[in-house]
Amino acid sequence: MNKRLVSFVIKLILFTLVMSFFAWSFKSGYYQLIIDDAEGFIFLLIQHIHMVALSSFLAIVLAIPMGILVTRPKFQKLQWLFMNTANLGQTIPSLAILALAMTWMGIGFKPAVFALFLYSLLPILRNTVAGIKSIDPDLLDAAKGIGYTPAQILLKIELPNAAYPIMAGIRTAVVINIGTAALAYLVGGGGLGDWIFTGIMMRDNSYLLSGAIPVTLLALLADQLIRAAEKLIVSKGLRPSAAVSD
Amino acid sequence: MIKFDGVTKVYGDKVKAVDDVSFEVPEGNIVVFLGPSGCGKTTTLRMVNRLESITEGKIFVNGTDVNSLNQIELRRNIGYVIQHNGLFPNMTIEDNVMAVPNLLSWDRKKKTDRYNHLMDLIGLNPDEYRKRYPHELSGGQQQRVGIARAMAADPPVMLMDEPFGALDPVIRSRIQNEFLQIQQEVKKTILFVSHDIDEAIKMGDGIAIFEGGKLMQYDSPSELLARPKNEFVREFVGQDRALKSLSLHTVKDLISERMLRKADGLQKHNKKTITVETNLRDALSILLNQEADQLFVQANNKLVGAMRIDDVEAYLHHHIK
Amino acid sequence: MNEIWNYIIENQASIGAYMLEHIQLVGLSVIIAIAIGLPLGIYLTTNEELAETVLQVANVIMTVPSIALFGIMIPILSIINHGIGFVPAVIALILYSQLPIIRNTYVAINNVDPHIRDAANGLGMSTMQRLLRVEIPNALPIIMAGVRQAVVMNIGIGAIAAFIGAGGLGVLINQGISRSNTTMVLTGAIAISILAIVADGLLGILQKRMTPKGFQQ
Ligand SMILES: Nc1ncnc2c1ncn2[C@@H]1O[C@H](COP(=O)(O)OP(=O)(O)OP(=O)(O)O)[C@@H](O)[C@H]1O
Ligand SMILES: [Mg+2]
């Protein structure tokens, strides 16, 4: 059978399934809550975004410098420690991190943001270190040889050439963050998870979908936005095939 | 211009990569470092711009001890080319070539002019390549851009570590020729690492042969071929060193020694013509391939004489051995 | 610390049962996921157009937050009376496993050295023989890496599935929160983390064992 046709048919089926889901859920009035309680929805949405933005921002401004630091020759020894901690930390489930933050800091917005921050540090740190380390040593040698200072090597060679993995790390972190923030309800952090968990407890499809669909769209949107930013930030000279992916 | 004075490099506390090396390179000369893998060529080269520290001894560039200079300053005044060209993949060709001028904050006009000039010099169209990235160029083109980058700020000294190592023989030979032509114009003092004796003979005003970190012989190519100082050098230049030395001479030399014969008009049926610039090694191989038993020699499109195998042999005998 | 220790000693039977439930949930899901993902990944190496589509879809699924996926599945599965419990949990875990398993299978088989493939053809192997004797063994370490990734991820998502009644170690966190019992929450969090770390370690060893000697550095 024609391969293109198979592919097309499968796409069509998936598209139809998604569309019929939306048609069905709309018809059943499951999104009415977003309109009826618009104020509450916007409050939770903003709370959600606030949590994600704050924790991601903190993670980025800490993890990238940290990654830069441990790739300096002086700190070579720390690198092993940091990478292994990051790898181990990523094995720990997000729910566990959230729960641990709560038992330590109590409930509320702060422990939620702290847990999200901690959890997003890891992929960014790991990708920053891996990205910088994967740069061809010849490049650094050439840069040194024509008289770049260490700061210029970092800014003009290392960071631009590691931009793709670093951005991929940020993307992974933010997307995971949006999902984990939906669990913040459990530690009293608020966000759209409030509605999802209410929906689960009350078996109420309106709460479920009015919470779950916006969270999903938020994650997909963030993913797309960061991919677009990648295209702008990462130099055209770096073919994605040559870059390390997450 | 460049002077090595008892230079030694020890890695860690054991590996003696360079061992008490002393020699001088006159201004405007190309000196080729030659020797087996691991003999210390790269290390010797990299001590000049202090990419490696000097364990003992001194290196002078233009009479100044390199250790007394600011390291960044020093490197900006020395062009550096490495084997896999080390172009920055995140930068356009223009930004690559202008890397050092950018560091030196030249004004825009000066940079554009310099870029255009360099690209013309290496035979690439400035506008066509300006906005391209390194991966969009062939290996040979990248190599040439690497050379342009090293020459950007017009450094009087260039260090080149197997700059043509990654190229196939045909392109390699072409770039060697182009490079020699450029050198005619710019007259830089160049240290050039190579693996290849033929490349060394072709490119070098002087050849420095290393073995185990020691300088075995430093001489002009013809001297080196004619009088290898020891067994190692003799082995290294090969059994065919007499033959190799022929490539240092052209048919012109034959003429100046009055060894060219009159063109024998009767043998026109087996005619093969070469120019006076042809080197004797190539001439000999044409004769040996029996493409002709006699070669006609042209200068400025005029027949000036003819030559046979015996003539090459006689020349070899009287002027090279 | 002492409290946790006491709690574990006192409740070892129920904690053990939760642990077992958790392992069953993850184990069953991953086995089904392999049964789907492996053949699919292999098939996709023969149809690039479709491979792109499938990997894109798997990528999108991966982007959907797990609690949101549960939220979306509950209304749908309620239609067949399985809105909460084991079924939605297994389905979600299978879906999430698809990306690492399919992608790694696809990439690994595509990356088998063409010379090896040529040699197999030269020996007169049929497509099936080549697949079973040459391509899959050579691709196995990378496929295992995908399975390992899926298992570790699923242990974490399985914990969240406790909130939709799928059981497992997440129950400790769920109940601990509603009873404001910090010890219980901590015990749950630590047990899940240990389970994930141990599974990662064991599968890592297995992955190394499967790597042919010649490939190891
Ligand atoms: N960073 C280093 N640390 C320790 N030893 C080194 C280092 N760099 C080079 N060496 C050693 O020093 C010796 C000389 O190395 P060098 O790179 O100068 O050789 P080379 O002549 O350039 O060889 P090749 O032709 O293979 O490039 C070798 O024995 C090498 O193993
Ligand atoms: Mg070398």
Image (spheres, rainbow, N blue to C red):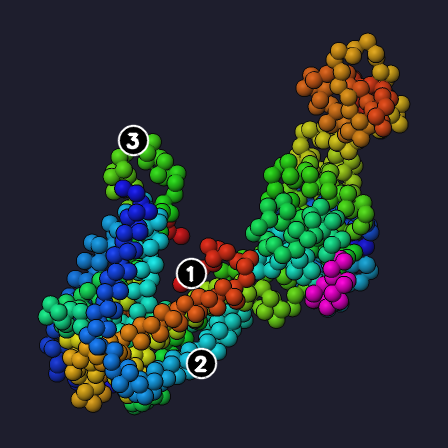
Q: Give the chain letter at badge 2.
A: A
Task: Using the rendered image, report if marks 1 and 2 lie on a common chain.
Answer: yes
Q: Earlier in the sequence, mark 1 or mark 2?
A: 2
Residue B173 coordinates in the image, percent (x, y): 68, 38
Instruction: Tell me: residue A159, above or below residue B124.
Output: below
Question: Mark 3 is on which residue type?
Answer: Gly
Packing grade of label 3 (10 A; few <14, some 14-19, many >=20) is few
Label 1: which secondary element: loop
- Label 3 resides on the chain identified as C
Residue ID for mark 3: C124
Residue range in magenta is B101-114
Q: Residue at x 75, y 11 (%)?
A: B269
Query: Please, what secondary structure does the residue beneath circle 3 have?
Result: loop
- What is the CA distance from the residue labelled 2 to the residue labelled 3? 59 Å
Is residue B113 located in the magenta-colored stretch of the structure?
yes
Whether residue B257 appears in magenta in the rendering, the answer is: no
Q: Dot 2 corresponds to which residue?
A: A58
Mark 1 — on which chain does it sit? A
